[in-house]
């Protein structure tokens, strides 16, 4: 899988960066309509940073996989 770094607007509730609400990909902004799925990967060890994944449906009616890297506080989208 390849990922491209993106800017993401997030909802922060009980934790920071709880879920994405919009993202900007290649000069276009997309609103997240729904979160289809969500999963986690990694551990607390430095060799496996914690990653949060969100499969979202955007306002263009397409699905995207967004990844949040907790170690670097960075978001990316999966490029097919």
Image: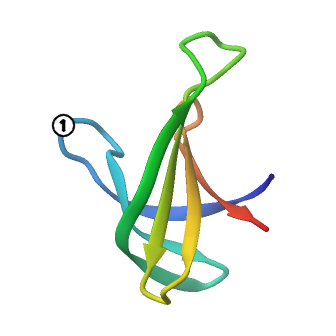
- Left or right of residue 2, residue 52 in this image: left
Nearer the observer, 63 or 47: 63
- Left or right of residue 78, residue 19 in this image: left
Task: Name the residue at the top extreme.
Answer: 45
- Left or right of residue 17, residue 76 in this image: right
Q: Where is residue 11 shown, x and y percent of the image?
A: 27, 55
Q: Where is residue 56 shown, x and y percent of the image?
A: 46, 66
Task: Name the residue at the front extreme.
Answer: 36
Q: Residue at x 60, y 23 (%)?
A: 42
* Residue highlighted by disc 1: 14
Q: Residue at x 48, y 86 (%)?
A: 61
Considering the numbered disc 1 on the image, is that residue within a helix, a strand or a loop?
A: loop
Task: Name the residue at the left extreme.
Answer: 14
Q: Residue at x 62, y 85 (%)?
A: 27
Rendering quarter of residue 28: bottom right
Q: Is residue 65 above or below residue 38?
A: below
The figure's colour scheme reads rainbow
Q: Where is residue 70 shown, x and y percent of the image?
A: 52, 33
The mark tally for this picture is 1
Q: Residues within 10 Å of mark 1 (few under 14, many from 20)?
A: few
Nearer the observer, 44 or 57: 57
């Amino acid at each position: 899988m390849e990922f491209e770094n993106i800017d993401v607007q997030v909802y922060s509730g009980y934790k920071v960066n709880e879920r994405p609400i919009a993202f900007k990909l290649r000069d276009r902004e997309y609103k997240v309509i729904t979160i289809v799925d969500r999963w986690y990967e990694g551990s607390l060890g430095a060799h496996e940073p914690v990653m949060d994944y969100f499969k979202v449906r955007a306002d263009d009616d397409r699905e995207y996989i967004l990844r949040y890297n907790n170690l670097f506080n960075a978001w990316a989208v999966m490029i097919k």
